[in-house]
Amino acid sequence: MKKLFAILLASVIIAVTLAGCNESADVSATTKSTTESTTTTTTTTRTTEDINTTFKEAATASIYPALNKDANGSYPYKLSTYTTYYDSSNSTRTVNINNAVSKLDDIKIPDGSTFSFNQTVGKRTVLAGYQEAKVVVGDEFVDGLGGGICQVSSTIFQAALRANLDIKVRACHSLEISYVPLGADATVQWNTQDFQFKNNSGTDLRMSVSASKGTLTCSIYAADDIDVGKVDINVSKDGNSYVLKRSVDGKVNYTTYSKYNKPKPSTTAKTTTKKAETTTKKAN
């Protein structure tokens, strides 16, 4: 009898153990399935022009009071206009230009207020619709998010000059560019370089910025009829520097200097040449 009881007890223990193993196997399978379904893929796409952020994004909004659009206001007096040209077949660069223009068109700049390009356009990110195109980094042209918007800031710079507005912050590129004369550009980068001017005209202003079929234009309109004077913009070369001077009624009231480096030899070109030479050598 005892022997029979021992056999039955052993059978029960084995059955419980097997059931426990099967349950553990099911839990493992469920865990694996859940893990596979929730795994995310990381991306190396840059979400800003400079990954080494030097200040918080919120800090930009506190530079000056935010400017708003005023599409319906009356600004009948044109103070200035300036046009540059771009290759509209370059799709990513065109997208970036259009994104920036959409933020800038119809922006009202009240009398005494300061316009900040970075504050108005905002951070150039993938979520904001910006794509990679050629940008200047150090002494090289490389692919970077938001490539092309410096043409927008440079076009506005030229329009602001001709409206006799007070240029507060402006810097040139490190390399030569072609969409404006050398010495006449205004580069921007989200967290390191802004372009700013102050409305010292005595009346409210509105910017009209448009981009279509390779033509980028910025015009500045005033609410009141004011006289900006006879404005003359001259760029000359002095040694290795370019000197831009603005004269109003014969008197210079703004001067800025620009100096450009030569681009580094293309690494890709070197690699391609080296491969070609190796192939030729083997063929011989």
Image (tube, rainbow, N blue to C red):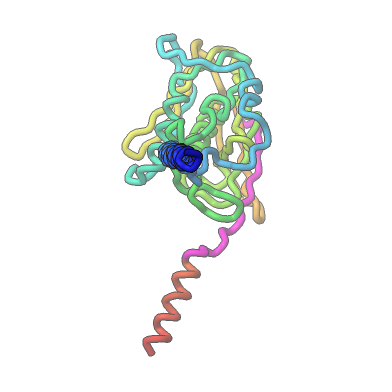
Determine whether 128 is above or below 256 in the image: above
Q: Nearer the viewer, residue 255 or 137?
A: 137
In-image side of 55 versus 108 (left or right): right
* Residue displayed at 54% across by 38% down: 48
Give residue 166's position: percent from left, percent from top.
Answer: 63, 26
State which region is magenta.
250-268
Marks counted in the figure total 0
Q: Nearer the viewer, residue 114 or 67?
A: 67
In-image side of 234 versus 98 (left or right): right
Q: Is residue 263 magenta?
A: yes
User: Does the rendering let one see residue 36?
Assistant: no
Q: Residue furthest front?
A: 1
Give residue 202's position: percent from left, percent from top.
Answer: 60, 13
* Residue displayed at 42% across by 40% down: 22
User: Does the rendering let one see residue 239?
Assistant: yes
Q: Where is residue 212, by image quadrant?
A: top left
Give residue 112's position: percent from left, percent from top.
Answer: 63, 15
- Image quadrant holding the C terminus, namely bottom left
Give residue 173's position: percent from left, percent from top.
Answer: 58, 46
* Residue displayed at 62% across by 24% down: 58
Q: Residue furthest bottom?
A: 284
Q: Is residue 193 magenta?
A: no
Determine whether 178 is above or below 164 in the image: below
Q: Where is residue 98, by image quadrant?
A: top left
Q: Nearer the viewer, residue 64 or 239?
A: 64
